[in-house]
Image: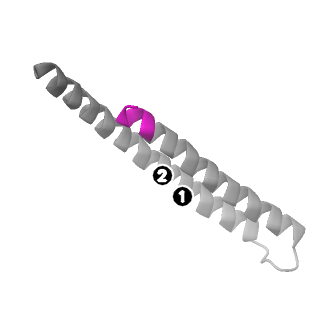
Amino acid sequence: MSKKARLILAMVIIEAVLAGIWWYLARFGIANPDRVTADFQAVVGQTMGMAMGGLLGLGFILFFVAASNDRKAAQNKTRR
């Protein structure tokens, strides 16, 4: 499995976990309005959105690094 494929798989799994946490916190806030502050949903949305977006941006950069490493490995493999 190439490094690009492993990175994509890892990013999908991590993003799914973060989405699950986001879903859990949103449902918790809806189910327990007396236990959370009035701006709980907005804070959770901003925080989780920023975390998921930041991770996706980092994954985008890492994808190009992985592609470069895959190309270098393929070139070294053909030289031998």
Q: Quadrant of the N terminus?
A: top left
| Marks 2 and 1 in Cβ contact (< 8 Å) | yes
Amino acid under disc 1? Ala
Query: Residue 5 in magenta?
Result: yes
Disc 1 marks which residue? 51
Residue 11 location in percent, x, y? 50, 45
From the viewer's perspective, is residue 12 above or below residue 5?
below
77 displayed left or right of 40: left
Q: Quadrant of residue 30?
A: bottom right
Residue at left offset 57%, top offset 46%: 13
| Of 67 and 44, the residue lying toward us | 67
Query: Residue 3 in magenta?
Result: yes
Residue 38 location in percent, x, y? 79, 74
Q: From which residue to which does the magenta span run? A: 1-6
From the viewer's perspective, is residue 76 above or below residue 64?
above
Q: Overall secondary structure of the magenta stretch? A: helix
Amino acid under disc 2? Leu
Residue 33 location in percent, x, y? 87, 73
User: Which residue lies most toward the top here?
Assistant: 78
55 displayed left or right of 39: left
Q: Secondary structure at mark 2?
A: helix
Disc 2 marks which residue? 55
Mark 1 surroundings: few (<14), some (14-19) or many (≥20) residues within 10 A:
some
Q: Quadrant of residue 48?
A: bottom right
Q: Quadrant of the C terminus?
A: top left
Q: Secondary structure at mark 1?
A: helix
